[in-house]
Image: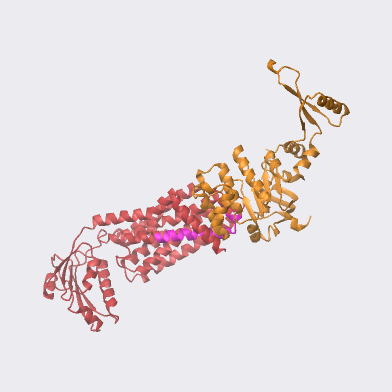
């Protein structure tokens, strides 16, 4: 992989707070245009890693290059090339959504019209004049994404974007993230919600106790750590009006010749209603790899 | 330091302060206080000043007397002797129904412009006017003559005072009390606003957003100070104007200097507070204490201090830096030649501002480290 293809390259990155080791030497790479997920339970070191990568705090050791900038030496350039969406909803509540964005336009020296364009992108144009305190959690989250996107950064950091959102809001936010990725923005997101990561990320790194314990695509991780099994749903012989389910489920091993024969027989009898592979979920993989629950 | 960032943050804060009900009330307080002082002043100063005037040429100098005295009633006479007779010679004791008398020669302004140094006679009844009021009136008359013609002095003003000057009457000179009170009361604004602006950014975690923007921590601090100073200075000026501080007399540039020094002192206290505490509630509580310390020296300067004499309280109050703002402003309001008398006040205030700023910088260096942990 050439360095121009890499948007993030962390090399043995460490951070200590007094005697507490928050990040214990992590290394990973994120390619341009991908959604990279940093997954782990609360306190695993995800937010500290983001703070180091965004230049908010200095690493205690190691180094990192983000969007072509050294996170310690090139901090001013780094700020121009990244957008950050924080875990907490840190908006100016008394100001309208538009004024929140206009303020960021002033900071970056952008025309105020950019605020309207970005509000359109996150579908908040209709509520642009409302004070942020009147916004739902999902709307605030989208507004924070809009704020981070104002200066069109090639790299976006999202710290726990799904935290505290109801399912509908979470889906709206995921849609925005996917849209950004499709438009070419590289995204690094941290989350303890494994389903969210599974739906969004092309690559994930599991972090536990300040260390990366696995780093691959979600599919590879699930295939590597999941069971090789098929879940087969069969039409039931029992009568539905007796109160019994009109089908039953069974699990078979596709590598077992006896199970292969059984499956062929059910197929011939037209009893098979559905077949699913039984790959592991990311959560199951995380528990297996890290030895702790993600949340 | 990034000018664009500083102005962006300052612009946002200036707007946010007006949208925030609690800070809006804070901003309105100096107006309301000044209006209250104005109302009290109007209610208490319903005294009529009787003036006897001989002014055959209808000179504009008469307007100066009108402007400098409250509730004026002018009686015109046809000869200067009538004015002289009504008051008597200098130093005499006489029960006169007039507080002031004025004899202005005909063609006064023309004589001034011709460089003839015409003579104006001002009669003062000491029973009703203090030395300070007399001095202010004479200064105002001199200023008028200088505005008509340049030669120094363009006119001769002869002062004749009958009856010994009255002892200090704080209620007669109450105008300066209100002006200084309005100034001191307004100083709470800067001390409250700056910590509020700083602490709210920390409390609401918006400071983290600013730290990943092109703004630096120093930009944030400078922007907050700028907003605090502009609001503070403007509100102090308005409060002084409402209470008539720029029209009483005295030395306006010096009063402006004390307003600026007071504003700088106010925001430097605010900076120290803002860098030391982390909640808006704590900032609010501190502002309450500070408002008391700001207003307290008001009762130990000017004519009220003369009444109190050299009491122990007067000496103790001098440990408060705000005393020197009050003292300097009071002298600037009541004395047209107050600069030499206020040098100590100016020096003390500047020294305190420097000490507070250095303390704040030391605290902020630690704070800059803390910011990264927020």
Which residue occupies the extreme top position in the image? A242
Please tell me whether residue A291 belongs to the stretch shown in magenta. Answer: no
The answer to whether residue B143 is above or below residue B299 is below
Q: Nearer the viewer, residue B225 or B88?
A: B225
Q: Is residue B357 left or right of residue A269?
A: left
Specify whether residue A62 is in view.
no
At 50% from the left edge and 56% from the top edge, which residue is drawn? B12
Which residue occupies the extreme right position in the image? A257
Q: Nearer the viewer, residue A138 or B129?
A: A138
Task: Determine the main secondary structure of the stretch shown in magenta.
Answer: helix
Please tell me whether residue B216 belongs to the stretch shown in magenta. Answer: yes
Specify whether residue B280 is in view.
yes
Percent position (x, y) of residue B33? 34, 54
Q: Nearer the viewer, residue A288 or B26?
A: A288
Chain letter for the orange part? A
Percent position (x, y) of residue B65? 22, 69
Percent position (x, y) of residue A199? 69, 41
At 68% from the left edge and 49% from the top edge, which residue is drawn? A182
At 45% from the left edge and 55% from the top edge, which residue is drawn? B191
Q: Is residue A46 left or right of residue B65?
A: right
Q: What quarter of the picture does the N terminus of chain B occupy?
A: bottom right
Chain letter for the red part? B
Q: Is residue B327 left or right of residue A8?
A: left
At 65% from the left edge and 49% from the top edge, which residue is drawn? A180
Segment colored magenta: B210-234
Percent position (x, y) of residue A270? 79, 25
The answer to whether residue A39 is above or below residue B13 is above
């Amino acid at each position: 992989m050439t360095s121009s293809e890499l948007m993030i390259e962390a090399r043995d990155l460490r951070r200590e707070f007094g005697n507490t080791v928050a990040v214990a030497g992590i290394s990973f790479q994120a390619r341009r245009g991908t959604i990279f997920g940093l997954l782990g339970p609360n306190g695993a070191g995800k937010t500290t890693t983001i703070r180091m990568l965004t230049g908010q705090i200095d690493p205690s050791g190691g180094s990192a290059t983000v969007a072509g900038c050294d996170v310690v030496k090139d901090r001013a350039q780094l700020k121009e090339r990244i957008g950050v969406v924080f875990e907490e909803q840190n908006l100016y509540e008394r100001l309208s959504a538009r004024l929140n964005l206009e303020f960021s336009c002033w900071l970056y020296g952008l025309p105020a019209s950019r605020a309207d364009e970005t509000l359109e992108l996150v579908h908040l144009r209709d509520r642009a004049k409302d004070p942020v305190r009147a916004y739902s959690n999902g709307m605030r989250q989208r507004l924070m994404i809009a704020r981070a996107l104002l200066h069109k950064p090639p790299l976006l950091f999202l710290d726990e974007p799904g935290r505290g959102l109801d399912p509908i809001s979470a889906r709206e936010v995921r849609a925005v993230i996917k849209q950004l990725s499709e438009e070419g923005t590289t995204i690094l997101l941290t989350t303890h919600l494994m389903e969210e990561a599974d739906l969004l990320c092309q690559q994930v790194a599991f972090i536990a106790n300040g260390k990366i314990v696995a780093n691959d695509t979600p599919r590879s991780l699930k295939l590597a750590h999941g069971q090789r099994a098929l879940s087969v749903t069969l039409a039931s012989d029992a009568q539905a009006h007796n109160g019994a389910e009109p089908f039953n489920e069974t699990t078979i091993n596709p590598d077992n010749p006896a199970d292969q024969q059984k499956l062929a027989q059910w197929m011939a009898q037209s009893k098979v209603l559905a077949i699913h592979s039984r790959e592991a979920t990311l959560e199951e993989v995380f528990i297996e790899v890290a030895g702790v629950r993600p949340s | 330091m990034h000018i664009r960032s500083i102005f962006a943050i300052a612009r946002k804060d200036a707007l946010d302060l007006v949208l925030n009900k609690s800070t809006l009330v804070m901003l309105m307080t100096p107006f309301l206080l000044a209006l209250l002082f104005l109302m009290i002043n109007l209610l208490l100063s319903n005294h009529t000043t009787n003036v006897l005037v001989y002014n055959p040429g209808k000179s504009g100098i008469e307007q100066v007397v009108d402007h400098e005295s409250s509730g004026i009633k002018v009686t015109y006479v046809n000869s200067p002797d009538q004015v002289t007779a009504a008051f008597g010679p200098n130093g005499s004791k006489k029960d006169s129904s007039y507080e002031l008398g004025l004899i202005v020669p005909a063609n006064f302004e023309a004589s001034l412009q011709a460089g003839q140094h015409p003579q104006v006679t001002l009669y003062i009844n000491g029973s009703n006017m203090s030395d300070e009021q007399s001095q202010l009136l004479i200064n105002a008359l001199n200023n008028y003559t200088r505005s008509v013609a340049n030669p120094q002095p363009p006119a001769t003003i002869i002062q004749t005072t009958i009856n010994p000057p009255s002892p200090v009457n704080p209620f007669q000179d109450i105008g300066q009390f209100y002006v200084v009170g309005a100034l001191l009361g307004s100083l709470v604004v800067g001390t409250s606003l700056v910590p509020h602006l700083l602490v709210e950014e920390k409390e609401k975690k918006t400071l983290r957003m600013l730290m990943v923007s092109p703004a630096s921590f120093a930009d944030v601090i400078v922007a907050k100070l700028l907003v605090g100073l502009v609001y503070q200075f403007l509100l102090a000026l308005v409060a002084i104007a409402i209470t008539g501080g720029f029209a009483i007399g005295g030395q306006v540039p010096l009063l402006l200097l004390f307003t600026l020094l007071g504003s700088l002192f106010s925001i430097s206290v605010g900076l120290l507070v803002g860098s030391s505490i982390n909640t808006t509630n704590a900032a609010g509580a501190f502002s309450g204490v500070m408002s008391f310390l700001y207003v307290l020296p008001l009762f130990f300067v000017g004519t009220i201090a003369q009444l109190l004499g050299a009491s122990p309280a007067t000496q103790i109050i001098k440990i408060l830096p705000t005393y020197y703002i009050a003292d300097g402003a009071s002298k600037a309001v009541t004395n047209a030649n107050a600069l030499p008398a206020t040098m100590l006040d100016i020096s003390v205030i500047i020294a305190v501002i420097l000490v507070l700023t250095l303390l704040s910088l030391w605290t902020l260096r630690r704070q800059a480290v803390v910011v990264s942990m927020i």
